Image (spheres, rainbow, N blue to C red):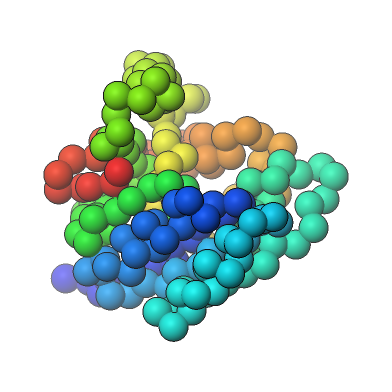
Amino acid sequence: RGELPTISVCIPARNETHAMTACLEGVLASDYKKLEIIVLDDSSVDNTSVLIKSFAHAGVRFVEGSPLPGDWLGKNHALEGLLREASGQFILFMDVDTIVAPHSISELVRLACRDSRRLVSVLALRSDQWRVSVIFGSLRYLWLLLRDSDQTPAVSSVAWLVHRQSLIELGGFVAFKQLVKPEMAIATNIEQTKHQQLVISTPGLDFN
């Protein structure tokens, strides 16, 4: 049995004081031991940066976002900044409002290693699933699943685990800096070698 890979959990944040604590507490409770946790504050005007720094004692690393160049979308620039800071063999990019159970990251890594995947994204099942925005979000991903192909692979931006070196070899986010869904373009490139997969959150793979 091979050694488990190191994972960088990378979270872009902007004005996220409402969700940051729950997100980080979930990641810190993970039973996966080979983690580094990096949060990039993307020019927040609230106390997001202070909140991130309050988790420094638990090993969370704060990164201050750099000024946004005119030809970049903001989130893509934040993701590129996180990529530059990450050192793990895999990077788990997560939205701040995503909550993980203690076993979630371990199960996601196990899935990726078992099936030799270089990108695995998770369609999270939200506990607040009856909110209108959540229902429409789920319908959007259902449409993606129905259209899934080599040219338009289904991929979720909520939480996606990607092999860091594979992402670097694609040029990081530089080639996708103006795309609203850079993860889809990255998945399309990786799909050509049949190494990407979308999975649906379950009690065994609990992303919320």
Q: Residue furthest bottom?
A: 57
Q: Is residue 125 left or right of residue 182?
A: left
Q: Is residue 205 left or right of residue 154?
A: left
| Total numbered badges shown on the rendered structure | 0
Image point (60%, 62%), residue name: 47
Residue closer to the observer: 27 or 195:
27
Residue closer to the observer: 166 or 157:
157
Residue closer to the observer: 145 or 192:
145
- Residue 31: image quadrant is bottom left
Question: At which x and y percent is residue 53?
Answer: 54, 74
Image point (18%, 40%), residue name: 202
Question: At which x and y percent is residue 183?
Answer: 52, 40
Question: At which x and y percent is residue 93?
Answer: 47, 53
Quadrant where the N terminus lies? bottom left
Residue 151 appearing in the image: yes
- Residue 156: image quadrant is top left
Residue 112 appearing in the image: no
Q: Is residue 52 left or right of residue 98?
A: right
Question: At which x and y percent is residue 98?
Answer: 38, 47
Image point (57%, 34%), residue name: 181
Q: Is residue 56 left or right of residue 100?
A: right
- Whether 102 is drawn above or below 117: the answer is below
Image point (37%, 57%), residue name: 22
- Residue 81: image quadrant is bottom right
- Whether 125 is drawn above or below 95: the answer is above
Quadrant where the C terminus lies? top left
